[in-house]
Image: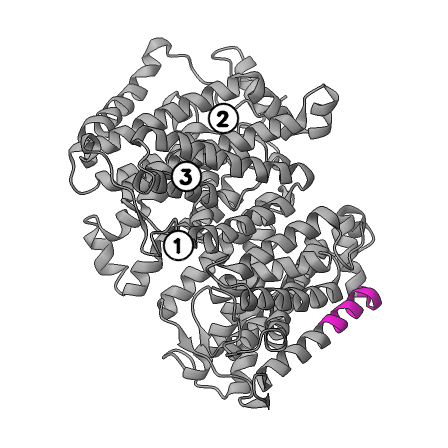
Amino acid sequence: MTDPVLALSFTGDIAAPAVQGAISGAVYGLLGLGLVLLYKSNKVFNFAQGEFGTCAAFGTLFAISGKGFLPEMPLAVAVLFGLLVGVAVALLTERLVVRPLFSAPKVTLVVASAGVALLLIAVQGFLQGAEPGNFPALKGGDVINAANIRLTWQGLIIVFVLAVLAVSSALFFSRTKTGTAIIAVSQEPTATSLVGISVARTSMLTWGLAGLLGGIAGILLSGSLGLIAPGSLTGLALIPAFTAAVFGGMTSLPGAFLGGVVIGVVEALASANIPTDVLPGAGRVTLFATLLLVLLVRPQGLLGKTA
Amino acid sequence: MTALDERAGAPEGTDAPDPHGERPGRDFGPVRWVPRLLVLVPLAYWILFHIPNTESYVAVATDAAIYSIVGLSLNIIIGYTGQLSLGHQGFVGVGAFTAAYALTVQGVPFAVTFVLAGVLAALFALVIGLVALRITGLYLALITLVFGLALETSLFEVPEFTNQGGGQPAVRPDWLFDDGRYYLFCLAFLAAAVYLDYRLLKSKVGRALLAIKENERVAEAFGVNVTLYKLIAFTLSGTLAGVAGALLAFRIGIVTGSGFGFFLALTFVLMTVVGGLGSRIGVIAGSSLFAVLDYILTQTPVKVAEEFIFRTDALKQFAPQFIGAFLLLLTLTQFPGGIAQQNKAILDWLHGKRFNPHDLLHPGKESGPGTVEGSSVRA
């Protein structure tokens, strides 16, 4: 069950779920950023995006505890180590799976990315077992703790990080040469390599960036949940993240941010206000309805452009 | 000209240089059936007469038969129409719940539950098919994915269907109570599904579907009613999945919503792709493999592996998933034709050709999976 992604308890009907939804939505958006990045550059849906995040979170967790084969590190170093793991996993995926399938149909690549996700979950399972591990928050405690509204520091950090990343990655694509090169490769690989841009290196770069974004999402989400289990990001946030990305327009980075927050709020409101005996799993059903509606009415999404 | 055409066109016994480094196949006449029969006859004996009498793995074999039906059903959508369905467990679940609910709560006769399961799942598939007319490609994959999830958390949790959350019982009638007999019953359904699939491909519908898969616009220009045939494909696939769901319900004996999660959908896609899209034998082999993988790794006397490899519970628990995913990635990057492709290499070798597992019937990476022996899909 995804509904309360952030384990907070509420009794209110509108305001409280809205705050909670906005924060879980920020996580969706964070994951959605990576999805949009890869869709923009590779025209592919990456089902392994959530697992880049879980791998990074496990990297952090193992670095904190040592796990017998790593030196025990302080939290800040462990987080860096975790992000490194996320990037490394993404780069390996690019090298071993994406590149051999460079000219294959996109559907093949999508299935392959789902396979990568399953493989990563299994590897995490080998190391961790099915039991979840405890994951520390970056900064504990509450910012606001009123009668029925509670905002944790971790939640605030998530929203802040997401906003910064959404803006900076949008600027990266529109203002820098590297960003433009990535777009160019996605539109016309042959012509791009003719003007001296390495398609292989650009692909490495995008997947590395996606790994980094996924890693940030994974570490932040696990921190706010306090728990991490094999495949937890895929199970909890991947589908809403996809919906968020589609909602914002699969090619727009600020759109993923906006879509994430909207989807999070809608999902939280639906599951808070529709009792389970009327409609079980109201959050999921709303998600499905939203996705369907967006795709049927405005397939290019809120901020997307029809290429 | 494809490699196949060249081989077929080459005169027997000539040593003409072949760009693919292939020896032309020699024609052994009727003798060429000998190696096949040596494999097929014991295999048929084992499947039909040995398995029903085994206590230990008849249940797993039943699962293999049921999964094979699901694989064939999914193959219609992925292999023939070229769309990706990540919500197939939804259709199977609808079939399972319909059968269990109809039999246990409504008291519908056993045989009729299969009809109901098929029809209801077909209706759901028709709705998804209607959506698929407007949304194609990757977005459709996303829609089917969320559809499956929505069913899992919503419809499959309705207390009325789930016996207040405890799971809906689905008890087989007395004449089918024996596990061995039920296994043969499922095999009969599988045979029917194979025949249906065979007839489908040979029919006008099948040819139309393959034409649509190759190029939708060209097919339409030649007067193929794309809308109609896509809907037919989805409905047929849904029917098969629904019936498979009913079989699954009676095999397990109790239906719960948690049994139809996203991982099942992924398993279905994995087994179909690993088996080899577009190839009936391949899909059945792949589906059976994934159905029995868990059993092979954890139950059977693979004690050596258990002692040396699966020493911890974590390893044991995640090994099937690891192997499944690994096989998928290996298939996609190295053998896009799946098991069907490897099977062809072995058959070719038996016929006196060089053993070449990388020989795709239809060269060219663009064609990707789905262009495999057994179907008339051509790149």
Quadrant showing the C terminus of chain B: top right
Q: Which-is-in-front pick, marks 3 and 2?
A: 3
Q: Nearer the viewer, residue A152 or B17?
A: A152
What distance separates the C-alpha of mark 3 from that of mark 1?
17 Å
Residue at image point 53% right, 78% down? A11
Asked if labels 1 and 2 touch by Cβ distance under 8 angstroms, the answer is no
User: Is A208 situated above or below A84?
Assistant: above
Q: Quadrant of residue A201?
A: bottom right
Main SS of residues in magenta: helix
Measured from the top left, where is residue A221 in percent x and y?
A: 54, 74
Labels 2 and 1: the sequence-earlier one: 1
The amino acid beneath tag 1 is Pro
Image-based side of B245 in relation to A163, left or right? left
Segment tinted magenta in the rendering: A166-177
Residue, disc 3: B95
Q: Secondary structure at mark 3?
A: helix
Q: Which mark is residue B373?
A: 2
User: Is B378 situated above or below B26?
Assistant: below
Badge 1, how many Cα within 10 Å: few under 14, some, many 20+? some
Image-based side of B65 in relation to A214, left or right? left
What distance separates the C-alpha of mark 3 from that of mark 2?
31 Å
Q: Is residue B269 at least partly visible in the picture?
A: no
Q: How is the image coloured?
A: one colour
Question: What chain letter is assigned to the residue under label 1?
Answer: B
Magenta highlight on residue A171: yes
Residue at image point 49% right, 62% down? A235
Measured from the top left, where is residue B334 in percent x and y?
A: 51, 43
The amino acid beneath tag 3 is Gly
The amino acid beneath tag 2 is Glu
